[in-house]
Amino acid sequence: MASEQAGAAQVLVASNRGPVTYSLGADGTLDAKRGGGGLVSGLSAIGDEADALWVCSALGDGDREAVRRGVGEPGVRMLDIDAAVHADAYNGIANSVLWFVHHMLYQTPLEPAFGPEFRAQWAAYETYNRAFAEALAHEAAPGAAVLVQDYHLALVPGMLRELRADLRIGHFSHTPWAPVDYFRLLPDDIAEQLLRGMLGADRLGFLTGRWADAFTACCVAVLGGTSGTRIGVHGLGADADFLRERSRRPDVEERLAALREQIGPDRKIIVRVDRTELSKNIVRGLGAYRQLLAERPEWRERVVHVAFAYPSRQDLAVYCDYTAEVARVAEAINSAYGTAGWTPVVLHVKDDFARSLAAYRLADVALVNPIRDGMNLVAKEVPVVSDEGCALVLSREAGAHEELAEDALTINPYDVSATAAALHEALVMPPEERAERTKRLAAAATALPPAQWFLDQLQALTT
Ligand code: F6P
């Protein structure tokens, strides 16, 4: 596309999930809800720029209706991509293939199997990526910077480069990157297409050196090299100012009181907060807690595990099964050990950010045990918000571990017994040590706040 057909935006962000979603009421009204999470807070730095545009996908009926009615926020363009194409691209390829590869979630002997269904979904993934590339090519001013986000849009850099050679294109991966042997589970032509798609960018960003090195290794193994594309590491941190202010508001105080009431006095609190996500390893975490109660009866009646597990990706059967399994295991612990005045596991599944912050403030111990995680912002948010200091039991497979290892209690996430032992160690940690560690964890966790994380990438791309 020639630059005279170019648009006006100087800085563009592209991601599957945008900063706002709409729900459609029975009476036809549209209700806007701003999203949360690291991506949204990081990329909201773009909001300060007048000539910036965030291109995202319409995700449900409400979003689609908003696009049809021309309802939207300034600086945001939602793409109304055919719902069936989006479902195959998002549920089929992004979340059932690429997510599984990068988090190493497949369970042989049945998975993976790349047959005709996969090929049809792959075609949808290409169509979906092309829709983004075309929209970005249309909206970008000559020489504009485009920052493409994540595994949903791995083909966009290459496609966009073909349409607009004048643009500066970056891509950032919010997930881990698979080791070579695991990445090569993908059909050869697909592995090649993915890597070439990403290498269409001028610069690629990853959350840790480990994921960046894995990507480079895949490029060397599959393509023979990274063909000059620059690669950088930007470890997204927690937003201290926002979290400290938000966690002191009245709605959080209210939930704090309710949680205290529910837990009962003089009890230690182990907190976890996750999407109900296979990679978050919630069932093994509950298993470790059960082992703690079984082997160390002195903790019975004296500790409560507050587990917030918010439903996620419920279009996928395996996520629905996992959600049910989490509830079943929590219930089994409560019926095995609970008493009239003590519920060992308090499981909440309704997403409530204010209640999560209240739990962060109260926690004596935070359990963050993913089997693999790009970063994990919960591990970074808890120390910032904690009232009295909180011991952090942290998987060595979380990206956050690279920055927090020194003051966390490190676990191998598959080792349930070691996790149970780490929970005990965390519970008996002297309060002064806990407070000291929390202070240092908070400093490390906030080293690169979301706005700076974004601006660093923009600067690296444009200089
Ligand atoms: O990179 C992973 C990610 O896209 C995060 O930004 C976010 O935490 C999570 O996955 C959300 O997944 P989904 O958009 O499928 O709900």
Image (cartoon, grey):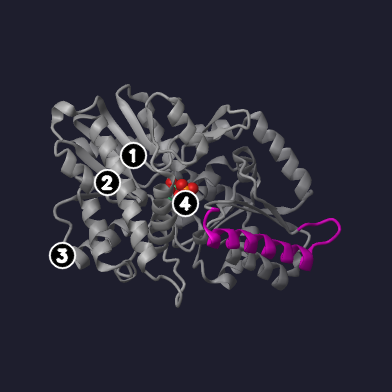
Report the mark closest to the observer, 3 or 4: 3
Whole-number angstrom distance, CA of label 3 to CA of label 2 = 21 Å
The residue pinned by badge 2 equals 156
Q: Are marks 2 and 1 in contact (CB under 8 Å)?
A: yes
The residue pinned by badge 4 equals 376
Report the mark closest to the observer, 3 or 2: 2
The residue at the point 32 percent across, 55 percent down is 123
Circle 4 residues within 10 Å: few <14, some 14–19, many ≥20: many
Q: Are marks 3 and 2 in contact (CB under 8 Å)?
A: no
- As rendered, which of 387 and 275 lies closer to the eye? 275
| Mark before the other along the chain sequence, 1 or 4 | 1
Q: Amino acid at mark 1?
A: Ala
What's the magenta region?
Answer: 314-343
The residue pinned by badge 1 equals 14
Whole-number angstrom distance, CA of label 4 to CA of label 2 = 25 Å
Whole-number angstrom distance, CA of label 3 to CA of label 4 = 32 Å
Q: Position of residue 409 (x, y in %)?
A: 52, 60
| Mark before the other along the chain sequence, 3 or 1 | 1
Circle 1 residues within 10 Å: few <14, some 14–19, many ≥20: many
The residue pinned by badge 3 equals 224
Prevailing secondary structure of the magenta residues? helix
Q: Amino acid at mark 3?
A: Gly
Report the mark closest to the observer, 3 or 1: 1
Q: Seen in the image, is 452 located left or right of residue 405?
A: left
